[in-house]
Amino acid sequence: MFAHLSAIVGGLVTAGWAGSIGCFLGPLVIWLVKKETMPFVDDQAKEALNFNITVALVFLVLLLLTIGTLGIGILLTAPLMIIVGIAWLVFTVIAAIKANDGVSYRYPMTLRLVK
């Protein structure tokens, strides 16, 4: 549960300067510390880490699209960023609730980068 919720805390703490990066630091730390001793935490921390890296990549692509169109693309990217941000929050809360119940949760549309 803490691996999922640490993404929200990391996003809030680093929101002013690196929100997308802060979102995967918490799950990364929890995964690195507990991967050898707790298999369920290992699985869920990897899942949270993969999901937050995927969301960070989506935000990076949207930012590059905005910059690449000299700011005109913000008409498209701003609503997409809001939708992705709300979906990120909802899926993270659902994952934390499921993990608290002892159920393994798989985020939808996630790149499985950390195996």
Image: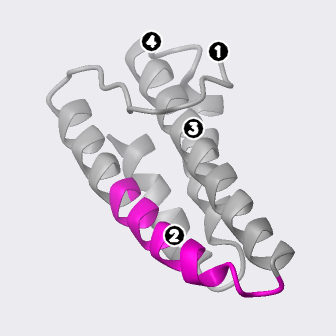
Element marked by disc 2: helix
* Residue displayed at 29% across by 20% down: 104
Q: Which-is-in-front pick, marks 2 and 1? A: 2
Viewer-side residue, 103 vs 53: 53
**Which residue carries the number 2 mark?**
81
Q: Give neighbour class at mark 4: few <14, some 14-19, many 20+ (Cα, 10 Å).
A: few
Q: Which residues are magenta?
A: 70-88
Q: Amino acid at mark 3?
A: Leu
x and y, in percent, of residue 71 in the image: 75, 87
User: Which of disc 1 and disc 3 is earlier in sequence?
Assistant: 3
Q: CB atoms at circles 2 and 4 under 8 Å apart?
A: no
Q: Amino acid at mark 4?
A: Pro
What is the number of the mark on residue 49? 3
Question: Real-space Cα distance between discs 2 and 4?
Answer: 34 Å
**Which residue carries the number 1 mark?**
115
Q: Amino acid at mark 1?
A: Lys
x and y, in percent, of residue 61 in the image: 72, 58
**Which residue carries the number 4 mark?**
39
- The answer to whether residue 59 is left or right of residue 39 is right
Q: Give neighbour class at mark 3: few <14, some 14-19, many 20+ (Cα, 10 Å).
A: many
User: Which of disc 4 and disc 2 is earlier in sequence?
Assistant: 4
Q: Magenta residues: mostly which secondary structure?
A: helix
Q: Amino acid at mark 2?
A: Met
x and y, in percent, of residue 53 in the image: 63, 44
- The answer to whether residue 106 is left or right of residue 112 is left
Q: Is residue 60 magenta?
A: no
Q: How many marks overall?
A: 4
User: Which of disc 4 and disc 1 is earlier in sequence?
Assistant: 4
Question: Real-space Cα distance between discs 2 and 3?
Answer: 19 Å
User: Which of disc 1 and disc 2 is earlier in sequence?
Assistant: 2
Q: Which quadrant of the figure contains the C terminus?
A: top right
Element marked by disc 1: loop
